[in-house]
Image: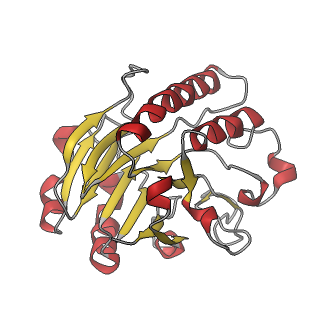
Amino acid sequence: MELASWNVNSLKVRLPQLLEWLIVRQPDIVCLQETKLEDAKFPRLEIEAAGYSVAFAGQKTYNGVALLARQPLVDIAIGNRYFPDPQQRLIAATIGGIRVICAYVPNGQEVGSEKYAYKLAWLAALARWLREEVVAYPHLAIAGDFNIAPDDRDVHNPVAWAGKILCSEAERTAFRALLDCGLKDSFRLFDQPEKSFSWWDYRMLGFQKNLGLRIDHLLLSTLLAQRCTASMIDREMRKHERPSDHAPVIAVLEP
């Protein structure tokens, strides 16, 4: 089975691409971020017609997360009880015996800013919650746009990005704290090509020159990591006209 995550950067704009990708790729579970839609405007019917159950939490213009699955979604939860927040950034459900959490981590804007402090506080609360979730759900995955490049391998120019937002030591420490909850970065379970990225700036021919960062991740609990046979980045979707600036990331799991 395939578990995928994709920051679509506006589901209204990217819906035709998503529906095409669902038909071609046929992932079993999909986590979406930055849907940027109020719940009343979410394209539930179109996604259900493609063969997927769906749960979502959205807001106007910003943020928004969704879970799509070929199996029913049960025990749906929105948000983190340790971090009450009007921003819709977390949704979880149990799907075929796997607890799946879709996360859109704050960007942080700039090191030292108020939004950076918010990001670090949000991540600390996420780690607190995940420590409990991993115990409650031994087969658990948290997938999404983490807005963190975990180490220099995940940055096209580590010198230029050193200490900057998405690459600062505090952010990387926060990411390691998530792994310390009992999670594995599925991408790093396998040998991967150098300069493998999931996000490229729209400007300066970022994608064409592969000036990217790997900030989209699929983190798996120990038991789920043992079932993982491959992990990859689907660069093809970034080649479309009017693409998201992110590519889908995928983990393949044994049943």
Q: In this view of the protein, can residue 62 be seen by the observer? A: no
Q: Position of residue 102 (x, y in %)?
A: 39, 46
Q: Residue at x 73, y 43 (%)?
A: 167
5 with respect to 217 (left or right): left
Snapshot quadrant of residue 255: bottom left
Where residue 117 sits, quadrant-wise, is: top right
Q: Residue at x 53, y 35 (%)?
A: 106
Horizontal side of residue 54 vs 236, given as left or right: left
Q: Is residue 120 above or below residue 197?
A: above
User: Which residue is most to the bottom?
Assistant: 24
Name, please, the residue furthest toward the right.
159
Q: How many numbered marks appear?
A: 0
Is residue 153 visible from the viewing direction of this image?
A: yes
Nearer-the-camera pick, 41 or 234: 234
Image quadrant containing the N terminus: bottom left
User: Residue 55, how many percent across, how many down?
Assistant: 22, 47
Closer to the camera in the image, 17 or 191: 191
When asked about the image quadrant of residue 253, the answer is bottom left
Percent position of residue 204, x then y:
70, 61
**Colour pattern:** secondary structure
Asked if residue 172 is positioned above or below residue 47 in the image, the reply reads: above
Q: Position of residue 26 (x, y in %)?
A: 30, 75
